[in-house]
């Protein structure tokens, strides 16, 4: 399409440029910090757009890494059940009075 990018990767580049510009123009910090963060955002967008490793695009690597992290982890509940005194207390035995003769 443009610069050899697919429509999706062109959207990554344009989105990163817009996010970098928005980061630069908002007055949230000193100019040097805003410039560094804006450059980082644009750099991440460039890597997502043009980056490849072993012939696989960077966005595919990101999705594969996230799927690996999600699928290889398990959540195990190890906490004990809460202690509720009136629920776990032994039941009192009803005692019958002894008959006396």
Image: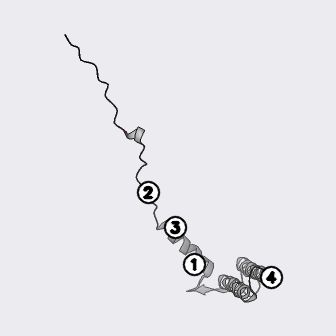
Q: Report which residue position mark 4 lands on.
A: 25
Which one is in front in this view, the residue at disc 3 or the one at disc 1?
3
> SS for tag 3?
helix
Is 55 colored magenta in this rendering?
A: no
Q: Quadrant of residue 39?
A: bottom right
Q: Report which residue position mark 1 lands on.
A: 61
Q: Looking at the image, which residue is at 36% across and 38% down?
A: 89
Q: Quadrant where the C terminus lies? A: top left
Q: Report which residue position mark 3 lands on.
A: 70
- Farthest left residue in view: 101
Count of labels shown? 4
Q: Which residues are magenta?
A: 89-95
Of residues 41 and 29, the one drawn nearer to the viewer in this rendering: 29
> SS for tag 4?
helix
- Marks 4 and 1 sit apart, C-alpha to C-alpha, by 31 Å
Q: Position of residue 9 (x, y in %)?
A: 70, 79
Which one is in front in this view, the residue at disc 2 or the one at disc 1?
2
Answer few, some or many: residues within 10 Å of disc 3's Cα (few below 14, many 20 plus, some between 14 and 19): few
């Amino acid at each position: 399409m443009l610069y050899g990018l697919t429509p999706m990767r062109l959207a990554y580049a344009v989105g990163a440029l817009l996010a970098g510009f928005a980061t630069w123009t908002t007055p949230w910090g000193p100019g040097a910090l805003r410039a560094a963060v804006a450059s980082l955002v644009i750099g991440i967008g460039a890597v997502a757009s043009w980056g490849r490793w072993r012939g696989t695009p960077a966005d595919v690597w990101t999705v594969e890494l996230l799927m690996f992290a999600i699928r290889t982890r398990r959540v195990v509940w190890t906490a004990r059940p809460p202690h509720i005194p009136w629920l776990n207390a032994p039941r009192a035995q009803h005692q019958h009075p002894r008959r006396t003769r």
